[in-house]
Image (tube, helix red, strand yellow):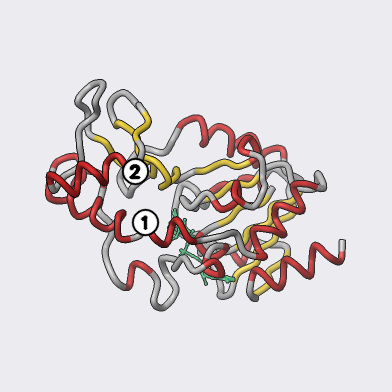
């Protein structure tokens, strides 16, 4: 299995959280509780989402995503567990049923009460006119991007799929994660405890380097491309 974080998408032009210049050095994320309780927090959150729209529309999979897709296509990788919300693994050709998005997807929105899907463009049209996001048309619930915010419950089905993939893996490759956001970061350790070899590819040290069988400090695109070529 491959486990990816924000670092696999920096070469596509999406900043990660913790590198210098990363998103956290510029703004604190809106907590889930605040999103629910405070219309102003929702407004700020949507404003930020719309500011990212151009980026989300322009970004394309990079060499790192393509190398992972190649490993999936060759049948070497069975599951790609990702913390990313950018859907670039799917865009690089990994079939939907082999991608496990632990933190959801920012390409659409969902009603927090009934789960109905809502398109971002429709929310934006309402926001531009009224200055806030619309409530769910079906049940009146609060609508939010289909991502998992800090303080929000993890998605049950994806957690179960990630657990199964981790227990079944004979090798877990982590690419581009600081391995510091839990519970997501527990899956590579679960795989390791269940008998998998554990490899980490990251630009800088991670919290789990001491537990890995192989650690490569390097850039994901060039390193993974060379590794796949050598197989
Ligand atoms: P993180 O920011 O904590 O860690 C990213 C790691 O990748 C860092 O250690 C950094 O050194 C490394 N890195 C960056 N670019 C690299 C490259 N080209 N080659 C090798 N290493 C590189 O990210 P995380 O562990 O995924 O946790 C952050 C949370 O932020 C996640 O929960 C995720 O949902 C969210 N997030 C997602 C995106 C996205 O969807 N692209 C972007 C930012 C944040």
Which part of the image, by quadrant, shows the C terminus? bottom right
Q: Which mark is residue 198?
A: none
> Is 41 displayed left or right of 59 in the figure?
left
- The residue shown at (21%, 45%) is 35
Q: Is mark 2 within 8 Å of ligand 1?
A: no
Q: Residues within 10 Å of mark 2 (few under 14, many from 20)?
A: many
Observer-nearest of 94 and 224 = 94
Residue 135 percent across, percent down from the top left: 20, 32
- The residue shown at (35%, 27%) is 115
Evaluate whether residue 192 shows in this view: no
Task: State how far apart marks 1 and 2 are (Cα).
Answer: 9 Å
Which residue has dot 1 on it?
53
Residue 125 percent across, percent down from the top left: 24, 44
Q: Is mark 1 within 8 Å of ligand 1?
A: no
Q: Earlier in the sequence, mark 1 or mark 2?
A: 1
Q: Residues within 10 Å of mark 1 (few under 14, many from 20)?
A: some
> Is 173 displayed left or right of 102 in the figure?
right
Residue 37 percent across, percent down from the top left: 14, 41
- The residue shown at (19%, 49%) is 128
Using the image, determine if residue 91 lies above or below residue 28: above
Using the image, determine if residue 115 lies above or below residue 183: above
Mark 1 vs 2: CB contact within 8 A: yes
Evaluate whether residue 221 shows in this view: yes
Which residue has dot 2 on it?
120
Q: Helix, strand, or loop for circle 2?
A: helix
Observer-nearest of 172 and 79 = 79
- The residue shown at (45%, 56%) is 57
Q: How many marks?
A: 2
> Is 122 displayed left or right of 213 in the figure?
left
Q: Helix, strand, or loop for circle 1?
A: helix
Observer-nearest of 113 and 62 = 62
Residue found farthest to the right: 231
């Amino acid at each position: 299995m491959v486990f990816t974080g924000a670092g696999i998408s920096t070469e596509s032009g999406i900043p990660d959280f913790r590198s210098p210049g990363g998103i956290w050095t510029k703004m604190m994320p809106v907590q889930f509780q605040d999103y629910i309780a405070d219309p102003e927090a929702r407004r700020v959150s949507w404003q930020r989402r719309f500011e990212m729209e151009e980026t989300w529309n322009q970004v394309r999979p990079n060499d790192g995503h393509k190398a992972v897709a190649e490993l999936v296509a060759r049948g070497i990788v069975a599951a790609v567990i990702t913390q990313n919300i950018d859907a670039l693994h799917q865009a690089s050709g990994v079939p939907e049923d082999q991608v496990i998005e632990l933190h959801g997807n920012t390409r659409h929105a969902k009603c927090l009460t009934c789960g109905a899907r809502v398109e971002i463009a429709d929310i934006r049209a309402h926001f531009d006119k009224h200055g806030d996001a619309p409530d769910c048309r079906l049940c009146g619930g609060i609508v939010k991007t289909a991502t998992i915010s800090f303080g929000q419950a993890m998605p049950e089905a994806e957690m179960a799929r990630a657990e199964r993939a981790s227990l079944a893996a004979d090798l877990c490759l982590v690419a581009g994660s600081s391995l510091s956001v839990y519970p997501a970061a527990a899956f590579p350790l679960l795989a390791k405890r269940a008998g998998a070899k554990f490899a980490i590819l990251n630009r800088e040290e991670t919290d789990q380097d001491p537990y890995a069988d192989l650690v490569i400090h390097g850039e994901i695109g060039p390193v993974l491309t060379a590794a796949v070529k050598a197989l």
